[in-house]
Image (tube, rainbow, N blue to C red):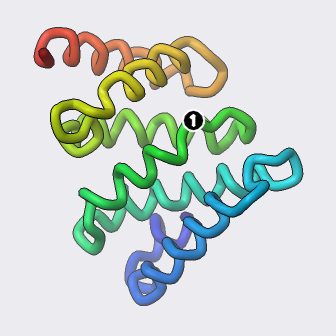
Amino acid sequence: GVLAEFNPNLFKPVLGDSLNGCNHLITMEGSRDDEHINVTENAISAVGKVIQFHSDSIDLNVMLPAWLSYLPVSQDDGETIVIYKQLCDFMMKYSSIVLGNNFERLPAVLSLLIEILGTELISEDTNPVIINIIKTMQNELP
């Protein structure tokens, strides 16, 4: 994730392998067990950074739904803050992809935003962002 964020030229040649490796870590049997959860949530954050900083090099219509399927996260305090800030950023930039065709992911996304609001899983700065996202959804979505 750090390489994707801070050294894009060095990261681009390994982008595909990195995503495949992260996906393997995240989806392997036992990835949510206590001994693996921090590695798993770090990998979820890394995938989010690839989406965030290399959106021009990936298929967002594939990667964003895959990343969303990895949520929720709740164990690695440092990573939950990053991941849920990413969720807010993605909602503001790519809401149609995040919410899906016919808003198929709307209930899950809305439920998750409500669940994390005001918790230690997010930074204080993220609370008003979530409130604004929910208000926008209320005003603009069917």
Q: Quadrant of residue 68?
A: top left
Q: Quadrant of residue 72?
A: top right
Query: Residue drawn at (54%, 60%), measured in percent from left and top?
Result: 46
Q: Nearer the viewer, residue 69 or 50?
A: 69
How many labels were placed on the picture? 1
Which residue is the site of mark 1? 72
**Element on which disc 1 rests:** loop
Query: Residue drawn at (48%, 24%), measured in percent from left and top?
Result: 112
Q: Nearer the viewer, residue 52 or 134?
A: 134
What is the x, y in percent for residue 138?
Answer: 21, 10
Query: Residue drawn at (39%, 15%), measured in percent from left and top?
Result: 128
Q: Nearer the viewer, residue 8 or 58?
A: 58
What is the x, y in percent for residue 118?
Answer: 56, 12
Specify the quadrant that holds the C terminus.
top left
What is the x, y in percent for residue 1?
Answer: 55, 64
Residue that extends furthest to the bottom in the rendered view of this protein:
13
Residue that extends furthest to the right in the rendered view of this protein:
35
Query: Residue drawn at (78%, 55%), measured in percent from left and top?
Result: 30
Q: In this rendering, is residue 68 above or below 15?
A: above
Q: Quadrant of residue 71?
A: top right
Q: In this rendering, is residue 31 above or below 101?
A: below
Amino acid type at circle 1 is Pro
Q: In this rendering, is residue 137 above or below 87?
A: above
Q: Nearer the viewer, residue 124 or 89?
A: 89
Q: Is residue 38 visible?
A: yes
Q: Residues within 10 Å of mark 1 (few under 14, many from 20)?
A: some
Q: In this rendering, is residue 95 above or below 129?
A: below
